[in-house]
Amino acid sequence: MLSATTMNNRKLWLTTGSIFTVLLLFFLWPRSALVIEAEGYAPLCLKAETFELHWIHSIEHEEWYEVYEIHDGNLLLTKTYFKTFGAGVPTDSETPPKITDDGFVEFTVNDTYSELYMNVSENVKTRIVQNDHEHLLYEMFETNTSVEISIGDKPLFCNSEGG
């Protein structure tokens, strides 16, 4: 027959072990994230939800931005916004372009990408906007750093900003 002290110790170890296991699973269980990676930098993880990619066009010196939704583990470019027509402007759309109240041309795209590659630059103010929060990539990475944006399992050691 086990003593009361031995029973209490077993309960304590069982409870502690259970709590530790639950916490371990919580922190190690992969979670989907918007992952931004660049060589020489720790990955940046954001919530895997709709975001806007903003920059200043290098020739037109006007802001451009694209709206991406997460769809089946991919990045779905739904709309692009720009102020002037020029180099790199989309030409095919399912619907006619619209002019927004703030003067942007809204263009429906609906193209899917497994990942995006881009160079970050302070000159063009590369940033991601998600839920009214700006992630200033040009302050997080050196100018001309090439980054990859994708949807993936959140790595264990990932610099999380809202993710």
Image (cartoon, rainbow, N blue to C red):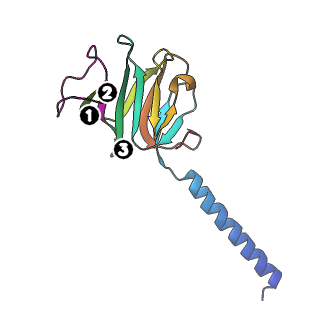
Cα separation between marks 2 and 1: 15 Å
Give the tally of numbered discs. Answer: 3
Q: Secondary structure at mark 3?
A: loop
Per the image, the residue denoted by label 2 is: 81
State whether residue 40 appears in this view.
no
Q: Amino acid at mark 3?
A: Gly
Q: Which quadrant would residue 20 be assigned to in this image? A: bottom right
Mark 1 closeness class: few <14, some 14–19, many ≥20 residues within 10 Å = few
Using residue 159 as the reference point, say whether residue 34 is left or right of it: left
Please tell me which residue is depicted at 36% across the width and 10% down the height of the picture.
59
Earlier residue among tags 2 and 1: 2
| Residues at circles 1 and 3 in contact by the CB criterion of under 8 Å | no
User: Which stretch appears magenta?
Assistant: 78-99
Answer above or below: position of 17 versus 144. below
Measuring from the top left, give residue 88's x and y in whole percent: 28, 17
Nearer mark to the viewer, of 2 and 3: 2
Image disc number at residue 73: 3
Q: Amino acid at mark 1?
A: Asp
Cα separation between marks 1 and 3: 14 Å
Q: Which quadrant would residue 142 be assigned to in this image? A: top right
Earlier residue among tags 2 and 3: 3
Nearer mark to the viewer, of 1 and 3: 1
Image disc number at residue 111: 1
State whether residue 100 appears in this view.
yes
Answer above or below: position of 123 versus 126. above
Earlier residue among tags 1 and 3: 3
Q: Amino acid at mark 2?
A: Tyr
* Rendered-image quadrant of the N terminus: bottom right
